[in-house]
Image: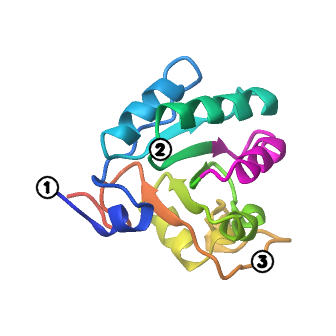
Amino acid sequence: MLHTPLCDLLGIAYPILSAPMGPDISGPELVAAVSNAGGLGLLQAQLCPPPMLREELRRLRRMSDRRFGVNFILRFPSEEAIEVCLEERVPVLSFSWGDPAPYLRRAHAAGAKVLLQVGSVEAARAARRGPASTRSSPRGRRPAGTSRVRSRPWCWSRWSSTPWRRRR
């Protein structure tokens, strides 16, 4: 079977991650099924109020004892839901459309792995240099008011199955 460094990093058997596709599609049942099969199931959190998210996480844990993650689109308010995930000790936090730097230290302190979804090879390279540089900015400059942190997220691009390489 295919086993990659991503498997080791995330503690999964196969390099398969489910897409967090909305509350009616990738709810706890699908996430548990993917995780139970050896992949990493990802639950979406955007449309879920924090108390409901907490209950979904607990329901998911009743269905699976395997690793899973929760995805956040950072262009939407996420602070309270991220706090719920940290309190509930979610093993993997996934971020997209934004700078995860404000959450990295707390996530790592809670023992969570952090994934960052990017939209291009260039954005993956920028994220590799430092999470604050993952925002779009003119001529590759870091946006004003951001700073680098030492913790780095694992990145993947929707354009490539192999991080930081162009698909040919």
Query: Circles 2 and 1: CB distance less than 8 Å?
Result: no
The three-letter code of the residue at mark 3 reads Ser
Dot 1 amino acid type: Met
The residue pinned by badge 2 equals 65
Crowding near the residue tagged with mark 2, few <14, some 14–19, many ≥20 C-alpha atoms within 10 Å: few
- Quadrant where the C terminus sits is bottom left
Scheme of colours in the image: rainbow
Label 1, label 3: how far apart the Cα atoms are: 41 Å
Read off the magenta span: 72-90
Q: Nearer the viewer, mark 1 or mark 3?
A: 1
Task: Identify the residue position indicated by label 1 in the image.
Answer: 1
| Element at label 3 | loop
Q: Pointer 3: what residue? A: 147
Above or below residue 18? Residue 5 is: below
Q: Where residue 79 sits in the image (x, y, percent)?
A: 82, 47
Category of crowding for the residue at label 1, using alpha-carbon neighbours closer than 10 angstroms: few (below 14), some (14–19), many (at least 20)? few
